[in-house]
Image (tube, rainbow, N blue to C red):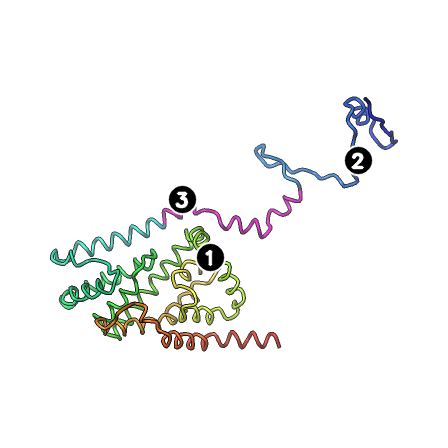
Amino acid sequence: MKAKILRSSSAPNNLLESFATTGASPSISMAAPRSLYVEPGGGRPLDEDREKNAESPTDKKYRGEKSPSRWEFAAALGVFLVFSSGLLFIYLTMPAADYEMLKLPRTLADLRLLKYNLASYAQLYPARFILGYCSTYIFMQTFMIPGTIFMSLLAGALFGVGKGLFLVVFNATAGASSCYFLSKLIGRPIVLWLWPEKLRYFQAEIAKHRDKLLNYMLFLRVTPTLPNLFINLASPIVDIPFHIFFLATVIGLIPAAYITVRAGLALGDLKSVKDLYDFKTLAILFLIGSILLFPTLLKRKRVYE
């Protein structure tokens, strides 16, 4: 059955004839026609609206979360091989009798045994021992291997407060900096997979404290508000400049490092790692952090006024 066509003087005759031939009822739309944009290479057509929105924040976020490229993986693997080669060289140049002592401590009992075995070696070969200690600490911090707190306790037990504190802050800062650049290469997918909600919270807080970012980063480093591992990995992802990250790490790790190194002097009396951060210690750390954060809070109050 043929459809009735209302002819108009402005409508082309051939178009009307095609409707009459096919028997389809034409649907007339008042909307303006949308031109199509065809992707190069014979891809599917895109309309102009999608083309205009190609640079939207959502698209940018999607592109920012792409997987690491081959050269980024290669660079990360190269860093790992360099560290591993250095540790292997140190291991092979040690006296053969000391091979069996080299074991990363996982408990306080392991740490006490390691301290007992390495005390004489540290006295006989101080430079070689410090080189091996620093390389191991930085390697663990860079590649997120648990157990650096035992290395900090060991520094206090073997070197005392002054020298031990310097070694711990130096190694922790060097390892955190290496982890920062490693995360800049391949860290985004890892952080998004492990801590998606925490990353969004961290990004929002960084945006709030952008004017006094150093003070806020010092607060995070001094207090256990966020784990140091997460801060190391997430900082380059939320665009924290390295100089602020570095300064906050050097200064902010001193209070916690002092507590840990000092506890290493009485390693035999320590019953659990949790005893390092009792209520009194946490209260002191948060008090220091609040003082560091005070300029940020004061500026925000002035803005509201």
**Between tags 1 and 3, which lies in front?**
1
Q: Can you identify the residue that label 1 sits on?
A: 237
Residue 63 among those drawn in magenta = yes
Out of 274 and 229, give the one closest to the viewer.
274
Instruction: Say what secondary structure mark 1 lies in.
Output: loop
Amino acid identity at mark 2? Ile
- Local packing at callout 2 (Cα closer than 10 Å; few below 14, some 14-19, many 20+) is few
Out of 165 and 36, give the one closest to the viewer.
165
Quarter of the C terminus within the rendering: bottom right
Q: Can you identify the residue that label 2 sits on?
A: 28
Q: Can you identify the residue that label 3 sits on?
A: 70
Residue 126: quadrant of the picture = bottom left
Instruction: Say what secondary structure mark 2 lies in.
Output: loop
- Local packing at callout 1 (Cα closer than 10 Å; few below 14, some 14-19, many 20+) is many
Which residues are drawn in magenta? Answer: 48-75
Q: Is residue 190 above or below residue 272?
A: above
Q: CA distance from mark 1 to mark 2?
A: 51 Å
**Between tags 2 and 3, which lies in front?**
2
Amino acid identity at mark 1? Ile
